[in-house]
Image (cartoon, rainbow, N blue to C red):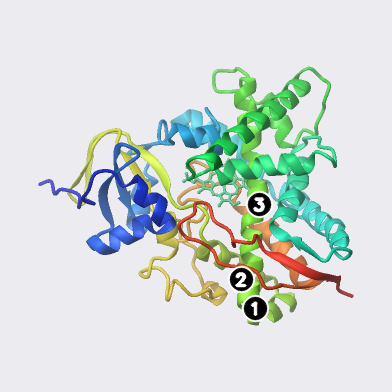
């Protein structure tokens, strides 16, 4: 027996996606009372799915591939072309292994130390200013941290523009019009910059340490024994730099949560490492960043009697699963304590993808993200005091990606004794 997948009636829902943003899948799943429905988006048939069972299905590599899943407009901005995100099977595993080798506990400790040092140095300058836009400052800080960690030389004077470019590639995701075109320009400039660095490493002008990403991308050999083409090596090195800069978004959400829930402040200040971990997990669960992830059906199959046709695009509702009332008690409340006795499943807390990290497509930088967030929140709560002046702190769920409207302004920054 085959049962038709519930249908989101109408012609093409791309405009609705632009309007409803993070809630697009959730709104329809609730209205149609289903975890799965079919729709038309970007002029193609799409299956949208939500819930932990759907997540488990989505990460079954026998049934889904990533090749051709990301629309060209996303490749031209966020991902780049021919990078790890669009690979499958043995080629993917080998490339992914190279990424995971960069994430050893020793290397994570290095980035945590760089993060602490950068917060110290940068926040000293804030003391002399009336106010600073925290998001912009943190982006620039993270750009310097990312480059130093990855073995990419960057001068003090170029950090701001490079940070903007890395930020704009992410900001273009989900955009049409000028914001999309800014992202394309930013990617073109960044690939040019990083491509030259790869060439300089290969011709001996630069010699980054062996355990850095720059070294790994320049000298990695594919299964066929060949080095990566310069363009692909640049895309992969940007797959390290860009998302490290994107941690700024989560740090701002952390600052936002602290502001909205001052009761968390004391617990963070008491220095118990466990509380900061819970707080960071709750920031990643609660706040909107990745809306959904996409894959294509590898071959015809049926799930719960629903037909999945070869090559159909399937979207998994990342934001919705992080707010699924079957998984999370009162999901729309910010409560770090929900992680007190959390078992940690592979398909429930999925802000950075689900399933197996070493073999599947789950984010390579999840632990790095958590570590950098923890170090940053520890700094914000224990090393400085600041005021949050009146401003627009609202976070639109229709803009993908989103931020507090005024990018979190702080004033009257003081170093703590
Ligand atoms: C993949 C989110 C930070 C490197 C992903 C995926 C998501 C994601 C949703 C796709 C998962 C999937 O397709 O199933 C995020 C978010 C971050 C973040 C929200 C917060 C800023 C990082 C960092 C790094 C990184 C810091 C590296 C330093 C990667 C790589 C992939 C990936 C290389 C591709 C993995 C693959 O296709 O096998 N990330 N990420 N990410 N992320 Fe992250």
- Residue drawn at x 40%, y 43% as measured from the top left: 294
233 relative position to 106: left or right: left
Disc 3 marks which residue? 368
**How many discs appear?**
3
Q: Position of residue 196 (x, y in %)?
A: 73, 23
Callout 1 secondary element: helix
Is residue 51 shown above or below 175? below
Q: Quadrant of residue 335?
A: bottom right
Please say if 149 is above or below 257: above
* 196 or 160: nearer the viewer: 160
Q: Secondary structure at mark 3?
A: helix
**Residue in the picture at 65% in, 80% down:** 262
Q: Earlier in the sequence, mark 3 or mark 2?
A: 2
The CA distance from mark 2 to mark 1 is 9 Å
Verify CB contact (< 8 Å) between mark 2 and mark 1.
yes
Q: Is residue 11 left or right of residue 135?
A: left
Q: What x and y, as percent, mark residue 66?
A: 42, 35
Q: Residue at x 27, y 46 (%)?
A: 39
Residue 149 visible from this viewpoint: no
Q: CA distance from mark 3 to mark 2?
A: 21 Å
Q: Which circle, 2 or 1, is nearer the viewer?
A: 2
Camera-side residue of 267 and 30 = 30
Q: Is residue 211 left or right of residue 313?
A: right
Residue ID for mark 1: 264
Q: Quadrant of the C terminus?
A: bottom right
3 or 1: tag closer to the N-terminus = 1
User: Quick one: 407 or 138, which is closer to the camera?
Assistant: 407
Mark seen at residue 257: 2
């Amino acid at each position: 027996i085959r049962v038709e997948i519930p249908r989101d009636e109408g012609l093409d829902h791309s405009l609705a996606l632009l309007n409803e943003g993070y809630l697009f899948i959730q709104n329809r799943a609730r209205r149609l009372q289903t975890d799965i429905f079919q729709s038309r988006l970007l002029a193609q048939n799409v299956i949208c799915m939500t819930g932990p069972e759907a997540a488990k299905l989505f990460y079954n590599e026998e049934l889904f591939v990533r090749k051709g899943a990301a629309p060209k407009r996303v490749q031209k901005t966020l991902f780049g072309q021919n990078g790890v995100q669009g690979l499958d099977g043995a080629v993917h595993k080998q490339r992914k292994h190279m990424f995971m080798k960069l994430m050893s506990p020793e290397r994570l400790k290095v980035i945590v130390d760089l993060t602490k040092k950068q917060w110290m140095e940068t926040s000293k300058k804030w003391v002399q200013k009336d106010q600073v836009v925290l998001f912009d400052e943190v982006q620039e800080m993270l750009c310097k941290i990312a480059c130093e960690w990855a073995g990419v030389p960057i001068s003090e004077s170029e950090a701001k523009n490079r940070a903007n470019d890395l930020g704009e590639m992410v900001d273009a995701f989900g955009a049409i019009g000028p914001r999309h075109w800014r992202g394309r320009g930013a990617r073109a400039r960044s690939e040019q910059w990083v491509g030259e660095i790869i060439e300089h490493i290969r011709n001996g002008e630069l010699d980054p340490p062996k355990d850095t990403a720059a070294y790994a991308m320049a000298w990695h050999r594919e299964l066929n024994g060949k080095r990566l083409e310069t363009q692909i090596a640049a895309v992969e090195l940007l797959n390290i730099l860009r998302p490290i800069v994107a941690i700024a978004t989560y740090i701002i959400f952390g600052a936002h949560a602290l502001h909205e829930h001052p009761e968390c402040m004391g617990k963070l200040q008491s220095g118990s490492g466990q509380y900061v971990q819970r707080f960071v997990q709750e920031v990643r669960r609660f706040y909107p960043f990745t809306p959904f992830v996409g894959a294509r059906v590898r071959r015809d199959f049926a799930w719960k009697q629903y037909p999945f046709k070869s090559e159909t695009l399937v979207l998994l509702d990342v934001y919705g699963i992080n707010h699924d009332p079957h998984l999370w008690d009162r999901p729309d409340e910010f409560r770090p304590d929900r992680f007190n006795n959390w078992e940690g499943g592979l398909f429930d807390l999925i802000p950075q993808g689900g399933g197996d990290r070493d073999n599947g497509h789950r984010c390579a930088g999840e632990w790095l993200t958590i570590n950098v967030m923890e170090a940053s929140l520890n700094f914000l709560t224990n090393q400085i005091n600041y005021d949050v002046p009146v401003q627009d702190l609202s976070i639109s769920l229709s803009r993908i990606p989103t931020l507090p409207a005024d990018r979190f302004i702080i004033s009257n920054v003081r170093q703590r004794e």
